[in-house]
Amino acid sequence: MIQKDLRATIVLELLFPLTLFIFGAYHGVLQVFYRAGLIQETSFLGIGYYKGLTAHGVINAIVLTTFFAVAFGHAVVSQQLGPSVSAAAAKAGAALMVVGTLVAAGPIFAGKADVLYTFYAPMKAHPLFYIGVVLLVVGSWVSFWGWIPGYLRWRKDHPREKTPLGAVGIFSTFIIWQMCTLPVAYELLVQLIPWSLGLTAGVNVVLSRLLFWFFGHPLVYFWLLPAYVMYYVIMPRLAGGKLYSDFYGRFVFLAFIVLSTPLGLHHQFAEPAISSGYKALHTALTFLVAVPSLLTAFTLAASLEHGARQNGGKGLFAWWAKLPHFDKERWLFPYLFLGLVIFILGGITGIVNASYSMNAVIHNTSWLPAHFHLTVAGPVFLAILGMSLYLSVGVLGKKIVAPRVAVSIPYVWTIGVFTFSAGLFYGGLKGVPRRTNLGMSYLDELSDAYRPDWRIGEYIGAVGGSIMGLAVLLFFYVLVRSLASARSEQQADSFALPESEAYHNEDVGAVRNFRPWIVAGVIAILISYIPPLIQVLGAKYPLVSE
Amino acid sequence: MAINSAVPNVEKKVLLASLMFAAAMLGLIAYAAIRLGISVPTCITNVKPFEEGELIRVAPGRYEAHVVAKTWSFKPNRIKVERGSVVDFYVTSKDIVHGFMIDRTNVNLMAIPGAVNYAQARFDKAGKHQILCHEFCKSGHDNMMGWIEVTP
């Protein structure tokens, strides 16, 4: 059961960012029209392209994902470890996150923070933008800290038992988050906020970028791992089977603690000031982090096969048809399953990005948004949509209205995001830049920069983006109607997340405790980041201001 | 199924296969970097940050381009070289972060204030290449560009 005194917090943490997401999605759709040259303006209905792009990135990639990870974490931890979560910490965390988001939203919508969510100095934003981001992150820390005493108690009371897998996944997610947000907290508190307040003359730009990308890649695992928790814990049950390997589940989550951070330089291949040898080291570590995802592909495919065979599936591949793809009773299944299908392409294109020399072809082109819309807007976003609907409706004791529409949403989204990405991949290989209002120059027939060969990719992107917008409309239709349905106290009390049993229930000592993995992670970070840090600090770059 | 301390063989094999896949990909990159000489920008310490952009003809068919990026232009922004030329590009920024990408080449760099970036390109075909700023640098970003003309 999900802890009763967390219900209100969970619902707030799901619905508050989804409300903001209406704008995030709106400007996502607008961007594809700007980029296709169908809107040839610097702004539309009073919102500038780059202001909208900043809000789209901050809301969708930072606010929605952080709130969701915390809300889902509350549900999983309190269900699997008993009523162990500090409700006071949960409320304090939620309050900090809401206040932080509102404080940051002010300057964004006032046009005083057009710095994108990567806040690349020395582009300067209003101090409140940075302060709001800090509060949001600290709020997520406080929520996490509220789980720790209950976990330690649970371990003490259950000395012979393995920690439930979902809790292992959620704790791994937040251990990574805690480690990777410390350098970016330094960047914000020591570099950006004092400079933005006018207390310092400028910023060591090279250092700030190193600190940002220390955070920037583990951030994607912070997005992804809650979805992994759903894949390992919930999906096999929905498929009618068991998790193929409990050991792999644990090993994968713990391996991410070690491997998700010491590889940020693969975002900085095109930069000066860092030796190519260090970049090569981070490339090697990036390939290692593909291993847990490959293991996941195996385990989940095996779990799905097990489920399908329980449902009467036969043959080498024919069993795929026996999964609940269109079952309106198990409408959550396609949100998870299709996310995995999308992630196959997202993962492969990620390996391309990490491939050192290949980066020169696609760095900062539209290939990149095409890639990460197949990860963060693929498995991550579909898991967030599906679980937000499942969890908010569940803890409120409501019921899903229009379950067939709920089933259709992930299919519409998948068609949209594949189309969108196809167009942007094609454009990226042709050199179309990302983060650029193309209609003002490259896709303006009257400009001497006009590139007719870029048109087709952006048109395909616009079609895909529109289909994605349609999926979002369908989602809010189901969400709003379901939340407005009649409430049943009894249903709310009996609501729980589905949990899978293990088919291979191994007990391996190495994956029993977090501590050795955290120590290994810290060592990996020190080995991979101390040399480039010494190089950057030793070069004494000037403080720069815009 | 009861708890079993042994990890089944199939799982060990999958782990091994995954590690081999990662090693194979890495091997290909090492091959490209070491044998084919395709690498990424490194830390340049032998070039002083320059203030002015210029194209220097070092020898026939050999050029050094000192490119300064500044909102919202490159200097020089029209570079003319003859077919077959090899150009060393040194790129820096005078204000905020910019990008420096030359269409249909492997030159794809970040221009960072205070630091100098480097890439080399060889132009074997006559024609025009667009230079683009591919990093968001505020309102005029979408019009920050230049051209390289390769004469026959």
Image: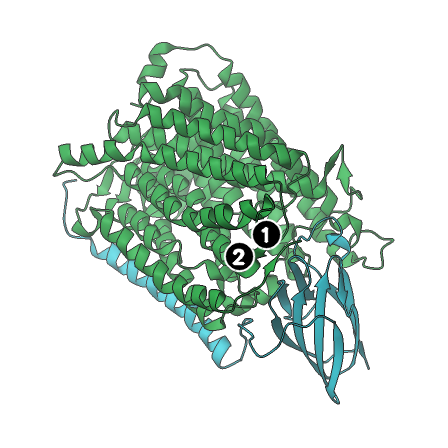
Chain colours: A green, B cyan
A445 w.r.t. A175: above or below: below
Residue that sits furthest to the right in the current view = A446
Q: Is residue A535 left or right of residue A414?
A: left
The residue under the point 58% across, 54% down is A368
Name the residue at 57% across, 55% down.
Answer: A203
Q: Amino acid at mark 1?
A: Tyr
Rate crowding at label 2 as few (under 14), some (14 to 19) or many (20 or more) other CA atoms within 10 Å.
Answer: many
CB atoms at circles 1 and 2 under 8 Å apart?
A: yes
Query: How far across and down, in percent of the image, does residue A41 sit?
Result: 80, 42
Q: Along the line of sight, which residue is nearer the eye, A544 or A493?
A: A544
Mark 1 highlights which residue? A120
Examine the image and state in which quarter residue A156 appears: top left
Q: Is residue A326 visible?
A: no
* Residue A275 to residue A478: above or below: below
Name the spot of residue A378 as percent of width and height, x first. 51, 43
Q: Mark 2 belongs to which subunit?
A: A
Q: Is residue A498 left or right of residue B81?
A: left
Question: What chain is tagged by disc 1?
Answer: A
Q: Closer to the camera, A141 or A383?
A: A141
Any part of residue A64 in sight: yes
- Residue beneath label 2, please? A209
